Image (tube, helix red, strand yellow):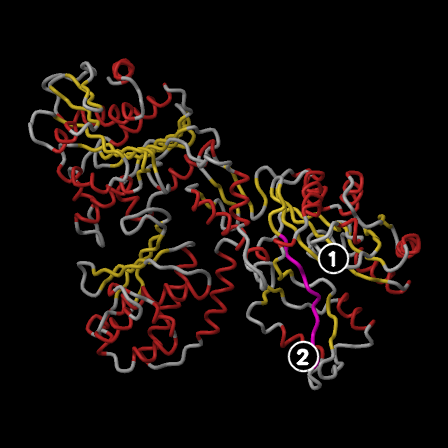
Amino acid sequence: MQIRKVFDLNGPNIWSNRPAIEAWVDLGHFEELPTNKLPGFTERLMAQLPSLLEHRCSIGERGGFLQRLETGTWLGHVLEHVTLELHSLAYSPLGFGRARETLEYGVYKVVVRAEDAGFAQLCMRSARELILATVDGRPFDLDAELKRLRIEGGRRCLGPGTKAIVDAAQARGIPHLRLTDGNLVQLGYGKAQRRIWTAESDRTSAVAESIAQDKDLTRRMLAAAGVPVPLGRAVTSASDAWLAAQELGEPVVVKPIDGNQGRAVSIRLDTEDAIRQAYELAAKEDRHGAVGSGSGVIVERFVPGRHHRVLVVGEQAIASVRGEADVLTGDGSSSIRQLVEQANLDPRRGEDDTWVLTKIELGPIALELLRRQGLTLDSVPDPGQEVLIQHHGDLTVDETDELHPEVAAMCVLAAQTIGLDIAGMDVVAQDIGLPLAEQGGAVIEVNASPGLLAHLKPLVGKPRPVGEAIVNQLFPAGELGRVPLVAVSGTRGRVEVTQLVARGLALSGHQVARADSTGLYLGERLLRPGTAADAAGARRALMNPSASAAVIEVSELGTLEAGLAFDLCQIAIVTSTMGAEQVARPGVEDRTAIDKAIRAPIDVVMPDGFGVLNADDPVVVAMAEKCTGHVVWFGLGEVEITPMQRHIAAGGSALVRLGSQLFWWERGQKSPPISAAPLTESTPGHAVEPVMAAAAALLAVGVSPARLEEFLNSSVC
């Protein structure tokens, strides 16, 4: 069984309106061996992946796929389901897949939904290895493979915070484009776009971020604004740190001025030796966690209480979580080092903030804490003995409903004082449900680009819709991040239609980004020569922050191999399907797939948008039933009973050619004749199709017939 080729369908495609991968899989001799002819295969596969029992398959009920295995199905179909299951177990649930025969014997197209095409391919290749091992009865270390896939998923796919924001945007109907392999994402198109980078937005000021990185400056600014903060000051040496501690009164906290994620932060120090050592440790830490280039150290009075993280978005504190100290409990036989190793085996623990729990690190601060408890890594605590490893552990307990309004107000004030639109406030207080002043609590740190996972997946309490809050901050009610988007499909006249529609929209005041076979344009300015009638060209047009509208040529071959670059469009135009069979190539021999590719933009017309269709092409006429928006016809009006005539009679819109003139029908009303040079009685239909298609689209969006006639006669040669 070989995977010959894989297409990354990064948008709506002939299989689904969501991104997917399409793999061409050659079953080889397994074409003669469905699953019911492979002894023990079904039992071994279900033993490895018992969760496959939940797959309903075409039968439509729990256990449906198992029934297909037992009665006999081909390994291409099995590859589809196993790929989906591995993806679901390693990263996130997926539910869409297809496996279809091609005209070549033993070759199947296997399609699965994909949030990241590269990761979906990895899952498919792992699924292939698992299936082949199952056929042969060979061992397959599924746990190790899932661990590898989880690591790859964390590296390739959106991080949990970014994914929460993107999911919330999609729920609002706001489109997105992933701009890098990381977490830089564009929400919206053209001039309506916004950009996020994890929990930072394009409104996150670089100045504010720099202030937040400087803990001493942050503390002084918050104090000036009236936010409770611990007393403290910057220090220049170990001796100065000890002097500051004496001034403030022990115990104290020693930390880097520009550190992050709690690195090199020493808490509750009350001896000169400990403070001097803490200074040396903090002085080596820079803001990236590297050693040797730190920019300063701060000493603060220790504030007793629990660690809380309050998330501020705009003018609201929307979520709060509490951290618990990392404490290990002895069993009487394991050393502290062994207890830490056991704790780090917890599958919820990982290396970074994409995991619910982070691995316990036995760094200098942890070793100092052990020393102060009279312990070493080789000490064996008594049964039930608690050993403190870290004062402030992972944030795991949701307490949003307990957050006192005054504490919330102070956190918002702190964020606004620094100038952050999204911020994580580290608060130390005995009880987050009481005002800070009543309990001696304080805001001890302000974090730009705060982690969101603790709010999305707390171990205790309910998840909070922080992604939704960020999206609502970026896009106030009613804003969807969209600009008028016109997609032009069909086998002929696409470039002419694209150019005419773009010019027409420009006359209406739009700055139009146009992507077609001649290049990428902004207005009439050529930005990038060469064909842009593909997904890459469309993406570039939609990324342009100056564009108030976009007109995109869509080729059927581009759709077959890469999908559409947009999720929805306001207008989809289909010019013709004549000659579509010429697109055929190995793997796409049937006309049905080609026609689906031509139709793809029609499938994603917005409910209040328009599908502009050629009434003289029977294949295009059949596409009307797939349009969820309003259908607008263009074509000849000579035949009495046509879909267009029935459409007009029902009050629909249509542009009808009668001889050398065009007539616009809308809500049962017929416009005065519209002339378009060089349209004459003898002009063949295919020659006037582009003009009529563009004209119908412009009329649909509100251009008056008189203005259209003026435009056509100035634009059409």
Query: Is-magenta flag for residue 117?
Result: no
Q: Quadrant of residue 384?
A: bottom right
Q: Is residue 471 left or right of residue 228?
A: left
Q: Decide which of tag 1 and tag 2 comes sooner along the chain.
A: 1
Instruction: Residue at 68%, 64% (x, y): give it.
Output: 324
Whole-percent x, y for residue 102 in the image: 20, 59
Q: What residue is pinned by disc 1? A: 291
- Tell me the quadrant of the picture where the C terminus can be found: top left
Prevailing secondary structure class for the magenta stretch in the rendered image: strand
**Dot 2, how many residues are within 10 Å of its Cα: few (below 14), some (14-19), or many (20+)?**
some
Numbered disc 1: secondary structure: loop
* Residue at the bottom extreme of this rendering: 333
Numbered disc 2: secondary structure: helix
- Tell me the quadrant of the picture where the N terminus can be found: bottom left
The amino acid on which the numbered mark 1 sits, given as a three-letter code, is: Val
Q: Is residue 285 above or below residue 620?
A: below
Looking at the image, which is closer to me, 265 or 404?
Answer: 404
The amino acid on which the numbered mark 2 sits, given as a three-letter code, is: Gln
Q: Is residue 531 above or below residue 683?
A: below
Q: What residue is pinned by disc 2? A: 338
Whole-percent x, y for residue 110 in the image: 29, 60
Q: Quadrant of residue 670?
A: top left
Q: Is residue 649 left or right of residue 393?
A: left
Query: Is-magenta flag for residue 321?
Result: yes
Looking at the image, which is closer to me, 121 or 418?
Answer: 418
Q: Is residue 427 left or right of residue 83?
A: right
**Dot 1, how many residues are within 10 Å of its Cα: few (below 14), some (14-19), or many (20+)?**
few
Residue range in magenta is 320-330
Instruction: Residue at 58%, 53% (x, y): give it.
Output: 452
Q: Is residue 708 above or below residue 284?
A: above
